[in-house]
Image: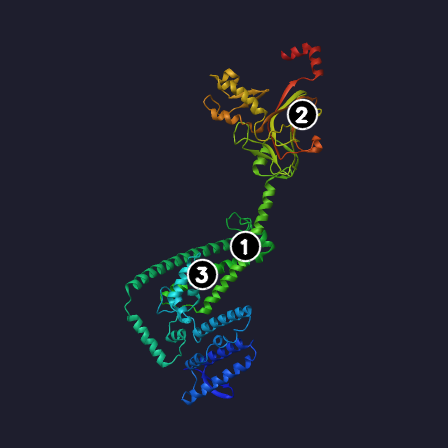
Amino acid sequence: MKKNITINLCGRLFQIDEDAYELLQHYIESLRHSFGKSEGGDEIVDDIEARIAELFTELREQGNEAITIDHVKAIISRIGEPEQLTENEESDKSDKAHKFDSFNSAAQGVYDNVRKRTSGKKLFRNPNDKMVAGVLSGLAKYTDTDPVIWRLLTVLFSAFYGVGIIIYIVLAIILPEARTPEQLLQMEGKAVTPQHLADIVVDKDQSTTQQPNLFRSLFAIILKILFGFFVGIASIVAIILFCGFLFALVVLVSALTFPVNSYMPFNLQAMGLAELYETNPMILIIFVFSLFMMLLIPIYAIVHMLLSLSKKVQPMGIAQRIAWILLWIVALCSIIPCSISMAKFRHEQRTKEYFHTHIYQDVLMDDNDMDFMRHGEWNLIKAEDCAHYTAHGEYFDGNKSVRYLDTYNDECRAIYQVERKQAVEPGIYRLDCIARAEGPGSFVYAIGDNKMLATIPAYGNRGGELAAQIKKELSHMLASDSLNDVGIDESTKEVDIKGMKFVLTDLHQDNKKKLKRICKGYGWSIVSIDNIVVTGDSITYGVSTDEGFTGHPYRAKWFSATDFKLTRTGDLPHMKNDKTRHPRIKRNKRR
C-alpha cells in the first residue's frame, strides 16, 4: 500500500503518490536552481509548472486517480532535464561563466541521476546475489548499477594498502541483510503490495533452484574457504582478547587486594603506580574501565556474529552496531590520554630513581663512569658541560675493554677536574701517566708542597709520542729471534719506556697485526712531572681543564688520561744530612 498526498499545482488539486511527489519536487527545485541566475528565470519555471499541471489534468481525464512515479518520470522525459533546457540560454555567456555553469550543471545532473536511482530505496546487503556478505550487490541494487562495477572498484582499492577490504568489512558490519520480503522490496524501491510480495517469493524460489555455472561454483567455494578462515581468525582473536581480559582482571584484583608494600608482582607499588593512585586515582579508574570496554566489546561482537551465523540469535541491527562502534571509539579516546599520563608519571618516577642511584659526588653519570670513579677513588672537583666522564675503545694497544678518564664537549666548553689523594712518606716523587687531547688547554697536575702542571700533548686520536717510542722499540724486535734480546720481558710481555712498563697483551713474534695496531697509538703520549717535593704525608694528583685552576684556556673537544703511577725518586735534603750524621743509628736499626 502506497501513501497518497494531495498537492496544489497552479491552483489545481491532484492526488499523487509520495515517491512521485518527492521526484516532482526535486525536479522543480532543479529547474529553479538552473534558471535562478537567468533573467526571467522565475517566469520560465512558472510556465513549466503550468505545463506539468496540464499534463496531470490529462492523466486524470484518462482515468488515473493518482499520479504515480512512472507518470512523473514520463513527464520529465517529455519536458526535458534542466541542463537541456538551459543549454541555449548559456551559450552567450563568457567562457569563464560558461565553464562554471557547465560544471554546476554536470554536478547537478550527477546528483539528479543518483537521486533518481536511489529514490524510494533503502540500503541493505543483498542475500540473493552475494559473493561474501552481499555488500556490493546491495550497493548495486541501491544505485541501480551492475554489481561487477562495485566488485572491480573493491579489488582496485584493495591494492592500495587494503583500503577496499577495510571499507568492505566496515559496511558488512554496519549494513543489515535484507532477510524478509518487505526488506527485499525496500531494497529495490518497490511498494510493499501483495503482488510484489508474491513476485519476491517466486523470484527467491527461482534463485534457489537455479543451477550455478562452474566459475561461480568455484568462486563460491573459494569465498567459503576465505569466510571460514575469517571466522577462525575471529574466534582466535576472541580467545586472545578474553585471555587478555582475564589477565587484566587478575591484575586489577591483585592491585586492589594486596598491600602496597607487599612482595606480590601485581601490586601498585611493583607497577610504580602507588603514588599516582594516591594523588590522582581518577586516571587509573578511567584507564581500567576503558580497557575493559575495549576488550569486552570486540569479544561480544565476535561471539554475537558467530551465534548469528549459526541462526541461534538475530543479527545486530544497524543502530546497535553503530552504538557499539561509537562506544568502542569513546573507550579508545579515553584510554589514550590516560596511557600518556601514566607513561609520563612512570618516566618521572624512573628518572627520580635513576638520579638517586646514579649520583656520584652530586654529579649524575652512568654506571660505567660511576664504577670507574668509585673503584679508582677519584674525586670530582668540577664537572660542567661534560658529555661523559670516562670512555673506552681507544687504548694505546688496541684493547677495547680498558676504560680511562675522558670527557667530551663539541663546543670546547667542558670544565672537568678530577683528582685523587695518595698517602706517601716525605721525599721527592715523579708522577707518570699516559694522556692525549684533541686540542690545547688540558693539564696533568700534582700537588705536594707546591702545585705543578704538565701539558697534555694534542695529537688527536692518531699517532702520539707513545706510539713513536713503542714503534722504535719494536723495530728491533721484528728483526730479532727473541723478545728478550730487545729489552722486552717475554714472560710478562712488558716493555719499559721512560721508566714506565707497558703490558703488550697477545704479543708474540708471529702476531704482526697486533704490533701494527699498537703502533697506531691513538694519540697517547707519556706525561711526567718530576721533582715533586713532599714534606707532608700525601700527594694529590689529577687532570684539569679549568682555566681558573690551570691559568690557560681550554680549546679542545676532548681529552683522555690513564695509567697514573707515582714513583719515589729521592729523599729530602735534611733527610740525607740525618743519615750522614747518625750512621750508627741506621746500622743499629738494620740489626
- What residue sits right under mark 3 in the picture? 298
| Residue 16 place in picture, x, y as percent | 45, 84
Rate crowding at label 1 as few (under 14), some (14 to 19) or many (20 or more) other CA atoms within 10 Å.
some
Q: Amino acid at mark 1?
A: Ser
Residue 385: quadrant of the picture: top right
Rate crowding at label 3 as few (under 14), some (14 to 19) or many (20 or more) other CA atoms within 10 Å.
some
Q: Is residue 275 above or below residue 443?
A: below
SS label for mark 2:
strand
Q: Viewer-proximal residue, 537 or 519?
A: 519
Q: Is residue 531 above or below residue 351?
A: above
The answer for how far apart the CA atoms under marks 1 and 2 are is 57 Å
Rate crowding at label 2 as few (under 14), some (14 to 19) or many (20 or more) other CA atoms within 10 Å.
some
- What residue sits right under mark 1 in the picture? 339
SS label for mark 3:
helix
Furthest toward the front, the residue is 92
Residue 353: quadrant of the picture: top right
Which residue is at 57% across, 22% downward? Answer: 469
Q: Which mark is residue 538?
A: 2
Mark 2 or mark 1, which is nearer the start of the sequence? 1
Q: Amino acid at mark 2?
A: Ser
Q: Is residue 168 above or below residue 502?
A: below
In the rendered structure, the answer to whether residue 402 lies left or right of residue 58 reads right
Mark 2 or mark 3, which is nearer the start of the sequence? 3
- Decide if residue 134 is in sight here: no
- Decide if residue 54 is in sight here: yes
The answer for how far apart the CA atoms under marks 3 and 1 are is 20 Å
Q: Is residue 144 above or below residue 299?
A: below
| Residue 253 place in picture, x, y as percent | 50, 55
Q: Which quadrant is home to the C terminus?
A: top right
